[in-house]
Image (cartoon, rainbow, N blue to C red):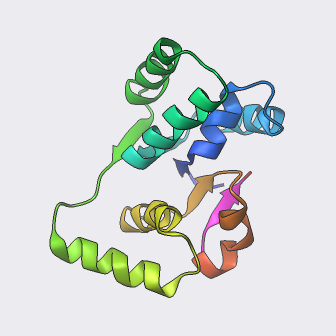
Amino acid sequence: MNDRVYLDASFIVSSQIQQNPHFQKADRIAKELIDKSLYISYLVIDEVMHGLGKYGMDKRVIYKFIVLELIEANNVTLLVNKPMKQDLKTFMRFWGKTSLQPRDAMHIFLMKEHGISTIASFDRDFIERQQELKIEVLG
């Protein structure tokens, strides 16, 4: 396992919801990630807020979790795109070469732009395309 891991929303939501079918696996993986450098993006935060809300988690609880466990965590870094049109063009070319939906392609693009090749995710699109995308999926 790589020391730098991008956290997908499917992994984060699964790790917080005991009724989730991936909860136990997410909990085990989370324990393995304690000493790793972890990465998220604004897209991940948006998807986590939505996912936890779908499970009926109170907005205040979601807020507290995201702030304390993600934003303020010492080993979690927020990745951002460069605000340049050239970067967007590069993303569009990347997306055009993959079989991913745009949002999933943005996650992988961010990872690649920051030299990250491992993602913690239960997203079937990432799992099934590991070789095509040249990534390792923990999930």
Q: Which residues are magenta?
A: 134-138
Q: Is residue 62 depicted above or below 52 in this figure?
A: above
Number of marks: 0
Out of 68 and 98, give the one closest to the viewer: 98
Is 96 positioned to the left or the right of 120 in the image? left
Please say if 95 is above or below 138: below
Residue 109 is situated, as x and y percent measured from the top left of the image, at: 42, 68
**Nearest the eye: 37 or 54:** 54
Residue placed farthest to the left in the image?
A: 84
Q: Measuring from the top left, give residue 6's x and y in whole percent.
A: 52, 50
Residue 69 visible (yes or no): yes
* In the image: residue 84, left or right of residue 133: left
Q: Quadrant of residue 128?
A: bottom right
Query: Residue at coordinates 49% horizontally, 65% vertically from top-left?
Result: 108
**Main secondary structure found in the magenta portion:** strand
How far across and how far down the image is residue 40, in percent?
44, 44
Please name the residue shown 57% across and 48% down the image.
8
Q: Is residue 33 above or below residue 131?
A: above
Res. 34 in view: no
Tell whether position 136 is magenta. yes
Looking at the picture, tell me which residue is in the foreground, 7 or 21. Answer: 21
Instruction: Examine the image and state in which quarter residue 90 appears.
Output: bottom left
Q: Residue at x 54, y 50 (%)?
A: 5
**Residue 104, magenta (yes or no):** no
Q: Quadrant of the N terminus?
A: bottom right
Quarter of the rendering containing residue 29: top right
Q: Position of residue 20 (x, y in %)?
A: 78, 33
Which residue is more in the foreground, 47 or 3?
A: 47
